[in-house]
Amino acid sequence: MKILYATSEAYPYAMSGGLADVAGALPKALRRRLVGCRVVMPLYSSVPEELKADMKFITSITVPVSWRRQYCGIFEAKYNGVIYYLIDNQYYFKREGLYGHYDDAERFAFFSRAVLEILPYIDYTPDIIHCNDWQTAMIPVFLDRFYCHDLRYLNIKTVFTIHNIQYQGKYGFELVSDVLGLPEADTPLVEYEDCVNLMKAAIECAHRVTTVSPTYAYEILTPEYSHGLHPILERNKHKLCGIVNGIDTVVYDPETDKALFENFSASAPENKVVNKAKLQEYMGLPQKADAPLIGIVSRLVGHKGFDLVKCVFEDMLKADLQVAILGSGDWEFETFFYEMAKRYPDKVAFKPGFIPDLARKIYAGADIFLMPSKSEPCGLAQMIALRYGTIPIVRKTGGLNDTITDVSEDGGNGFVFQNYNAHEMLDSVWRAVGLYSDKEAWQALRDNALSIDNGWNISAGRYIKLYKELLS
């Protein structure tokens, strides 16, 4: 069985979010299970020079973009035993940032077509092309419409994974002829609610559709979570399933992580308290061992639950606790946390932006990790927090529901609240702070968190089962 994993980003070549972590870890996990898996992605100018130096040029071709053809260079690289193909076109990909450009639709339509066009040149004919999010949504469509009569492509199946249904690839109808090159008769395939919707087209054309957690697969069948796509998903429910993401337990390993102040492990957790004290010092907070330290590492936007946090934050600070925040996003929330850090310097520390090294220090040094998302397709942060012995507070939604069980239940590993309500969240904070004062109970909870395996092995097995079912 041979899989080609098509993605717009992948660790370590280009990263903007959780998709890069998944694209870097799942293919590696599949190969450990003796499944052939290679990755194809764009060659961005931001790819680190030391990684570019290890790439091998295969050949160059031209790729159709509607009525014109564009240069496509094919490079090959190998990282952690996985072969990567990187698609070069400096006009499309030599830019600042991965996304957010005026012609993103054309850039990723080119990439989607290139994934199919390079197959005769890379000596790798996949049984399945696994596509991810709207940037690769046209691969199942192009395969179905332009390659179905070519014997080299005849038996290739497609899987399309929705990592976040909010971002669907919506554009004007001029895209159909000017960029996608689809005949007029195929316009209904990409049309939805008076615009072109690339994700909708992928859901219609892919052989299987997955999400990144079982709960999210159920949620997006409802108007509340689907961002308008629930009728399309309901019609294609027979090919929809959810498989929870894992984390790379080698990349995220408190025993070897060089970003930590001191390393520790499940069998020797003593240095976690050293990481807490040094994190407090690093963030400018008083070193108070008995005050629980709450960590937040997130994009500071509404759907991550920060309107709840803002509503009751000062009530939360009435307790003897501290909060260390790392993130950037909406001006409203950045300004709020700046103000809180200024007003309560002994209790609140805020660092804007995303600093990977500091994120690891917060995961390792905090006692509690706050993640009150309004929606969360899967979420990796709560699993990374557990990996570092930090106890999550989460809302019961998406992948948070599938990975965190309340401490009131058998095997509980965190604190869970049901409704999207600020005072329900605050009640979970009080429960966590109360349990923290019971040192023996908290130590048992921490030790349980450190022992949990949220690696890719189980989830990779579920993908393999899905692939086998599709091919049979």
Image (cartoon, rainbow, N blue to C red):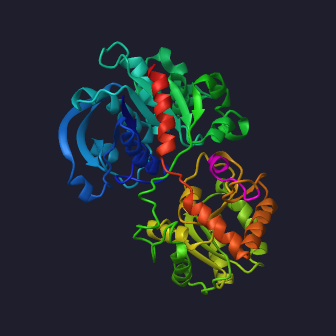
* Up/down of 157 relative to 219, above or below: above
Q: Which residues are magenta?
A: 399-408
* Up/down of 439 relative to 129, above or below: below
Please report the residue visible at 38 percent of the width from the left and 45 percent of the height from the top.
28
* Up/down of 293 relative to 37, above or below: below
Q: Nearer the viewer, residue 235 or 111?
A: 235
Q: Position of residue 129 (x, y in %)?
A: 40, 30
Q: Which quadrant does the N terminus fall into? A: top left
Is 183 included in the stretch rendered in magenta? Answer: no
Is 404 included in the stretch rendered in magenta? Answer: yes
Q: Position of residue 216 (x, y in %)?
A: 64, 40
335 sits to left or right of 117: right
Please report the residue visible at 73 percent of the width from the left and 68 percent of the height from the top.
432
Q: Is residue 2 visible?
A: yes
Q: Nearer the viewer, residue 325 or 268?
A: 268
296 sits to left or right of 462: right
Q: Nearer the viewer, residue 398 or 226?
A: 398
Q: Is residue 8 visible?
A: no
Please report the residue visible at 33 percent of the width from the left and 24 percent of the height from the top.
67
Point out the residue furthest to the front here.
Answer: 267
